[in-house]
Image: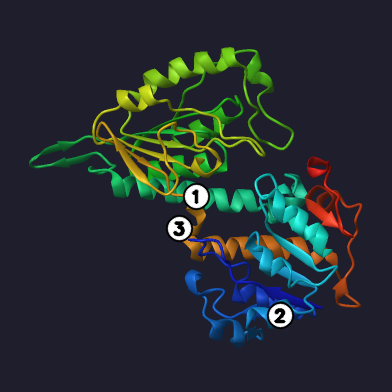
């Protein structure tokens, strides 16, 4: 079995799909591992480090030629897809809702494409959950980005010259990213509050030492999908929540928004008027900026300033902590692949009826097979 790791081609993507640790493990499974030259440099993994654990470091054409398995972080470019052999297994965060042309290209090339974002959130798939591993680091990094832009410290400081008050931080969305943001802001000494539409989040937020802010109603009792994501709420609920949030935001120094709905535009949480109600010197970090943004004034790839309030719109936050993000992502891929490899023949033996496989395979045998993307 030839397994190849490609170099990322999307701008500002610093992560890599394999670590020396997982390369060593793949080789022990019986794979011949090929790494595209320079694939790991932005994540502090040199070609020599891959070679030292037994990988062959080669040019892209040689890496992709006759590869049985190709590992990527993000979706490959059309020219790369054209180099993949029929029947090759491609794994990556392929963004099928956004990259529909790439989806068609996988099918046309005969590639079996697996979108790691679609791995179901069930117990036996926890070690494969790329959304959680990457969101956890994104939440951490978002707080650091806010601290960098903020003109004050986070903790309360009592000095001979006077007392410096603690920063007030408001986290919107208490999923994986939001909970890590709460924990990080608390460790830095901030006074933290958070909101989410899921009542189950209240206990988690409070266990981290933050205050929970939410409009409670009958609707919130069913505000979570089977996969653990927040559902989109009714217009009436949104209006009530917006009033509460508007009053809360006025008092904050830092706001971090983390709300995403799979396959949908990110919900608007912070309006123009809310931004303008904040004190000059305040900071907002929008982790959903690539999917339309939770903040109306956020711009992808920019730090904009409105009435003295900075709005941070860095895309791909996990890539800004690429070393750890790559290491965790690489383990997610390894854990997904291990059950697909026959130990005796040391080749792929995929159970197409497995729940995890069925949920994450996009294309197979020249066709788009995932029900969410057919037609």
Q: Quadrant of residue 74?
A: bottom right
Which of the colour schemes (rainbow, by chain, secondary structure, one colour) is used? rainbow
* Residue drawn at point x = 71 percent, y = 49 percent: 100
Q: Quadrant of residue 225?
A: top right
User: Element under label 1?
Assistant: helix
Residue wearing tag 2: 33
Residue 215 position (above or below residue 55):
above
Q: Is residue 168 left or right of residue 231?
A: left
Residue wearing tag 3: 320
Q: In which quadrant is the N terminus drawn?
A: bottom right
Does the residue at mark 1 contact the one at mark 2 (Cβ under 8 Å)? no
Toward the left, the furthest residue is: 161
Residue 216 position (above or below residue 54):
above
* Residue drawn at point x = 40 percent, y = 33 percent: 297
Q: In which quadrant is the C terminus drawn?
A: top right
Residue placed most toward the observer, 208 or 355: 355
Position of residue 370 measured from the top left corner of the image (x, y, whole percent): 82, 47
Residue 131 position (above or below residue 329):
above
Q: Is residue 190 left or right of residue 32?
A: left
Cα–Cα span, label 3 and label 2: 27 Å
Cα–Cα span, label 1 and label 3: 8 Å
Label 1 crowding class (10 Å Cα cut-off): few <14, some 14-19, many 20+? Answer: many
Residue wearing tag 1: 138
Count of number-bearing discs: 3
């Amino acid at each position: 079995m030839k397994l190849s790791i490609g170099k990322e081609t999307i701008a500002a993507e610093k992560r890599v799909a394999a670590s020396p640790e997982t390369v060593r493990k793949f080789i022990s499974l019986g794979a011949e591992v090929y790494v595209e030259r320079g694939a790991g440099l932005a994540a502090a993994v040199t070609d020599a480090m891959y070679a030292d654990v037994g990988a062959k470091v080669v040019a892209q054409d040689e890496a992709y030629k006759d590869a049985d398995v190709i590992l990527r972080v993000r979706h490959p470019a059309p020219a790369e897809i054209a180099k993949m052999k029929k029947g090759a297994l491609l794994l990556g965060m392929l963004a099928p809702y956004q990259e529909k042309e790439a989806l068609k290209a996988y099918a046309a090339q005969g590639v079996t494409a697996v979108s790691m974002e679609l791995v179901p959130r069930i117990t036996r798939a926890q070690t494969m959950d790329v959304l959680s591993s990457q969101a956890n680091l994104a939440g951490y990094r978002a707080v650091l980005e806010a601290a960098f832009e903020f003109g004050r410290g986070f903790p309360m400081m009592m000095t001979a010259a006077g007392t410096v008050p603690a920063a007030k931080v408001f986290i919107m969305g208490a999923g994986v990213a939001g909970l890590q943001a709460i924990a990080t802001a608390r460790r830095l000494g901030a006074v933290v509050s958070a909101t989410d539409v899921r009542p189950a989040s209240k206990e988690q937020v409070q266990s981290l030492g933050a205050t929970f802010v939410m409009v409670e109603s009958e609707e919130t009792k069913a505000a979570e999908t089977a996969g653990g994501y927040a559902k989109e709420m009714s217009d009436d609920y949104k209006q009530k929540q917006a009033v509460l949030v508007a009053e809360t935001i006025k008092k904050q120094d830092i706001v971090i928004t983390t709300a995403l709905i799979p396959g949908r535009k990110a919900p608007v949480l912070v309006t123009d008027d809310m931004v303008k109600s904040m004190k000059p010197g305040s900071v907002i970090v929008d982790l959903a900026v690539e999917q339309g943004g939770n903040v109306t004034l956020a711009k992808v790839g920019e730090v904009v300033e409105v009435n003295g309030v900075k709005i941070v719109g860095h895309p791909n936050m996990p890539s800004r902590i690429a070393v750890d993000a790559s290491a965790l992502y690489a383990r997610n891929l390894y854990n997904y692949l291990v059950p697909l490899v026959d130990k005796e023949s040391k080749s792929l033996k995929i159970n197409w009826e497995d729940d995890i496989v069925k949920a994450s395979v996009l294309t197979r045998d020249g066709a788009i097979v995932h029900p969410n993307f057919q037609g």
